[in-house]
Image (tube, rainbow, N blue to C red):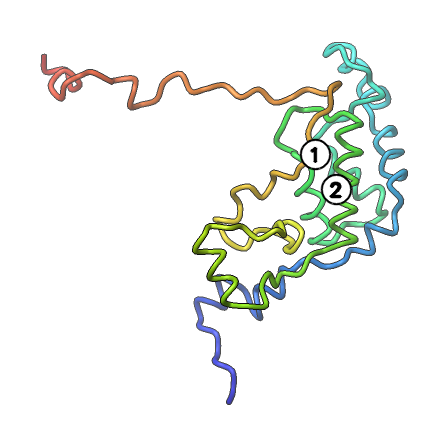
Amino acid sequence: APAPAMSFFGLTYLGSGNVFRNTRANRLDGLLAVPAEAFVDAFHQMSLERTRPKLAGEIGVDGVSFMMRGELPELMERVLGRVPEREELDVFLTFFDITATGVIDVREFEDGIARMRNRSEHPASSRNYDSSIQMQRDRAKNRRHGTDPQMAYAKPLLASQEYGWFTHQAQPSEIGFRREYRGVQKTDVTLNEGRSLQSYFGEM
């Protein structure tokens, strides 16, 4: 029997073909062909000591050990000698937190490169189960499968997968700057907490 045709919504929203096959993780030989030392050498070439020594002095850091975090994609392109493919860039950004502090330390960078190379060399299968019975048992007991989705897919397939997707990113070392999390002091709800409907609209 012929395979059922995909609806117009499926073609426009999910893209053509099998979305799971199109986004599954592949072995990235292009990244593996570049030794980790080449990435570290590029890091030192783009370090603050060489590119922004004045900034390094102002923030009081060893310029050799830090570089600008926003220049990581440029570093990748420089090391590869070409524009990275979409999956290569997705993998790179998965293991580096580009939304953290403005500078990245060399130890965090080396950790991120090691994670990226491990994912590139050992992509996991997107097929988690061979038994529907076992899958039903695990779901009934809320047991999570041992394979992390970052190892099986190039990017999140659904919005629900975005939660926790970046939990395997490299973290700043003891010489780096960790992101500070501060609680919300007030919101539009607590700002007017305790007011009545009349006093809120200024009628009393």
User: Where does the image place residue 104, in percent across and percent down from the top left?
Assistant: 73, 26
- Identify the residue at horizontal 9%, vertical 12% (top origin): 204
State the mark number for residue 34. Answer: none
Compare residues 155 and 63 and report the one nearer the observer: 155
- Identify the residue at horizontal 65%, vertical 24% (top origin): 101
- Identify the residue at horizontal 79%, vertical 42% (top origin): 76
Instruction: Please count the marks in the image.
Output: 2
Q: Which residue is mark 2?
A: 115
Q: Which comes sooner in the sequence, label 2 or label 1?
A: 2
**Label 1 packing within 10 angstroms: few (<14), some (14-19), many (20+):** many
Compare residues 82 and 22 and report the one nearer the observer: 22
The amino acid at mark 2 is Arg
Q: Which residue is mark 1?
A: 170
The amino acid at mark 1 is Ala
Compare residues 1 and 146 and report the one nearer the observer: 146
Q: Which residue in the rendered view is the most extreme toward the bottom?
A: 1
- Dot 1: what SS? loop
- Identify the residue at horizontal 50%, vertical 19% (top origin): 182
Q: Is residue 7 left or right of residue 80?
A: left
Cα distance in 3D space between marks 2 and 1: 8 Å
User: Where does the image place residue 38, in percent across and percent down from the top left?
Assistant: 89, 39
User: Where does the image place residue 137, in percent across and percent down from the top left?
Assistant: 47, 59
Above/below status of 74 relative to 140? above
- Dot 2: what SS? helix
Are the two marked residues, 2 and 1, in contact with CB atoms closer than 8 angstroms? yes
Above/below status of 52 relative to 73? above
User: Where does the image place residue 111, in percent across and percent down from the top left?
Assistant: 77, 34
